[in-house]
Amino acid sequence: MLRAGCRMALDVGSSGDWDGRWRHVQKFLERSGPFTHPDFEPSEETLQFLLETCKILVIGAGGLGCELLKNLALSGFRHIHVVDMDTIDVSNLNRQFLFRSKDVGHPKAEVAADFINSRVPGCHVVPHFKKIQEFDESFYRQFHIIVCGLDSIIARRWMNGMLLSLLVYDDGVLDPSSIIPLIDGGTEGFKGNARVILPGMTACIDCTLELYPPQINFPMCTIASMPRLPEHCIEYARILQWPKEKPFGDGVALDGDNPEHIHWVFQKSLERAAEFNIIGVTYRLTQGVVKRIIPAVASTNAVIAAACATEVFKIATSAYVPLNNYLVFNDVDGLYTYTFEAERKENCSACSQVPQKLQFPPSAKLQEVLEYLTENASLQMKSPAITATLEGKNKTLYLQTVASIEEKTRPNLCKTLKELGLADGQELAVADVTTPQTVLFKLNFTS
Amino acid sequence: MADHKTNKDQRYDRQLRLWGDHGQEALENAHVCLVNAAASGTEILKNLVLPGIGAFTIVDGHRVSGEDVGNNFFLSSDSVGKNRAQATTELLQELNTDVSGNFVEENPDRLLDNDPEFFHRFSLVIAVQLEESTCLRLGSVLWNAAVPFLVCRTYGLVGYMRLVVREHTVVESHPDNALEDLRLDQPFPELTNHITSYDLDNMEKKDHSHTPWVIIVAKYLQKWCREHDFQLPRNYKEKEAFRQLLREGIRKNENGTPEEEENFDEAIKNVNTALNPSKVCVSVEDLFNAEQCENITSQSPAFWVMVRAVRDFVQAEGRGSLPVRGTIPDMIADSDKFISLQNVYRERALQDAAAVSRHVESHLQAVGKVCIWGTLHMWNAAFLRVVHCRALVEEYGVDTVHKDEITSCMDNPDSEMVLYLMLRSVDCFYQQHSRYPGVYNYQVEDDIVRLKLCVHSLLQEYGLTVNVKDDYVHEFCRYGAAEPHTVAAFMGGAAAQEAIKLITHQFVPFNNTFIYNAMAQTSATFQL
């Protein structure tokens, strides 16, 4: 209804939509075309599906998350949930455009949801200021598609494992309706990647674990007695001096976000560097090393999130055949993209149903098994907890994440597998942060 | 004052780690013009405002439509009817109070008629969703004024970018995989002296195992050269023999088994790196041969004075080599040995840089100018680059079109080149019918026939014997000139980063046409 005196008010219908609002999107939903997905049928109902029914989960409300929320909202998605356990920091503001200075300290998910909901009428983003691990299958099962903008490989693997655990097999045949597509994006400086994962069907995160090289930590002997780089001096202050000198009190952990803490590390690093005639220790470098900062800009996040959102749209509407299945992007020198099909790993510990093997002589110590689980490039577990069934009872052989149990089970690390009473062919159950489900290993004794 | 600086340092921390304080300064001194505040344009600006561009000015005569609000994050439901430049400026400005946002409620054609010099003030002009005729006019004005021009468009599921700049100099290209500059094939005197100071055979075990691999390789190269007529290992066979020589250098224990000496393992692994010839790379040679390097005048930009000074150095003090870079990779060694080795390279680099400065000074004096060091902060001779992107008029000229490039790409009829030809064809359509094909449903079928005629006349005009599949003609009618947000957002990120490269003179921009295919998630760069 036109109000007198204004230029031209929006004719907002009962659905909250105005004339032409979705015209850019409709052309892809209501017209046939030569490149559409074989399942595609032009219809006015697809738009209604997006607006009223389709439910998307966005994991992360940071650099990628903010972009994803905007992209999805402007593509017709209205029922969006977003999960992020973090609060806003000043250093986020150069790219996480849903946040302002006044929002620093507030939960990202909540501020992001508020902004989108007010800028894009009709869009209903539901925030969750929580860790992904705080939700179970019943939460994740409600979504048609899940899209991740995470900054942690562990979290990605957990999400990957969760969706795999939702798969239903009838007589060994995968029920397609139990598949929730996972779109995963990642960025670092001027590089990024976007991938489409159909759990149980295409390569999963763990299938391509080797694409993520394990994080390099400097050897302790270098840090302790042979520093050469300014980074070595900083790690010395962080790893050795801080626990020893407890500069801010007993039990006070080094907080990378506390400028006083960083300043202390910075001063100590300068002293260490001076001792060895090493130049290059700066406050910025100190912060970067302590917080393991990854440089980030708005543009790379924009590109990757856009590619991810395009895939969400394709999958939700069958408008086009989705990316199959991995896109790599780099704009350091011109713009470079590479698109390929990542292959499933035959014996993937997450998605193949091939039983995982552990091959050790009975004289091997449990410590060696632990090292294998963490160091093997295809497993890369973080702090695995190993249990086995012995004499009919479930026994924890080693668990790191609870201090009292760690202390109690630590002696087992020095015992041999034989001493622990393990037999050839025995099953070991391993739990780890990288997966919501326990991984079963079969122990094979070698001679 | 100090507080505000720290706050900006904090805010921009993550990007300062990529382009440094001097890059940020360049960004904050830049003023960018956006023509057309369509979604593709506002997405580009978002990615420039967030990192702190100095100022932007939007030129747009359109009134906001319901359709605009639907795909543009920087318009809200009460923007309809307002001038699009004004409405989007408000919401873009709000992203970052450090940035100065301006708008001109005017059609670019009118500005070109009445005040083309309006555009001369900008560091860069970006035009999105602009009709071909206006684009060519604007391109011409900017070319003559030497203002860089970036054209960007989103057309259905296709993204397009074209960079038009006469000469763009890259001071720091930051290559991903730069070769180390160790000079082991032609050690400078201080390096040779340093190597000589080591007596590997008579060292204590601890020192032997903690000698940097660079020293080890250098020592053994000296040995090799004495036994091979002063020739370095040249082929695979010789390099393998050299590796064996290194292996034999590993200390053995009482039983004759080799000890664990990781520094020797590193030396063996790095033989190829060590034997990389220390010669001037092709891209720098090209700079040396350029006319701008040869003729230094009072008008010469700082970049070319620098290149000339480096060339002079290479011909004089450098004896055929570039100034020493001065950095070495980390390697297993004790602190003293590593630091003293690093200092040898570092001090030489400082000396070489000083020599280059003297050459710069003498050229400046010769043309009567003052010191220009302020404008060229960090540089590394091996990483200097220059990019030339052709004028639009050459791309469009029947006699100057890059026929071969187009034809050979079209050997694969599904190459991204077909998307370029389709964009040119819809522009022909627009010229003829004053609208784009398939905007309304009822137009689609008939427009396919009309668009196909445009394709044929385009191919004929340029003498291109290529096959454009009917499927693409149909698809481009289907698009109906839609600008889906996700494709606009992709191009927004891509274009913004190219803009930042142009402004900071860091990292290498594309040359000169970039096509993004959102259907297949592929892209290609062509030089047209």
Image: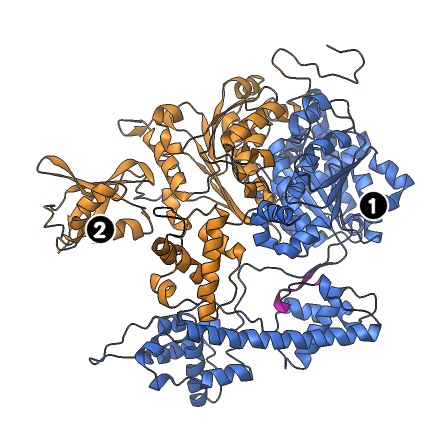
Give the Cα distance between marks 1 and 2: 68 Å
Confirm whether circles 1 and 2 share one chain: no
Q: Position of residue B498 (x, y in %)?
A: 66, 49
**Other-residue count near label 2 (Cα within 10 Å), few / some / many at <14 / 14–19 / ≥20:** some
Q: Is residue B414 magenta?
A: no
Left or right: B71 with respect to A258?
right
Q: Which residue is mark 1?
A: B119
Seen from this angle, which residue lies furthest left?
Answer: A391
Residue numbers of the magenta segment? B376-388
Q: Which mark is residue A152?
A: none
Residue under the point 30% across and 29% down:
A173
Which residue is nearer to you in this view: B31 or B164? B31
The hue used for chain B is: blue
Q: Which residue is mark 2?
A: A369
Which residue is nearer to you in this view: A271 or A221? A271
Chain bearing tag 1 is B
**Other-residue count near label 1 (Cα within 10 Å), few / some / many at <14 / 14–19 / ≥20:** some
Vertical relation: B285 (above or below) B112: below
Q: Tell me the kind of residue under disc 1.
A: Phe
Which residue is nearer to you in this view: A129 or A259? A259
Q: Tell me the kind of residue under disc 2.
A: Val
SS class, disc 2: helix
Evaluate whether residue B414 shows in this view: no
Q: Position of residue B260 (x, y in %)?
A: 29, 72
Residue under the point 40% across and 79% down:
B242
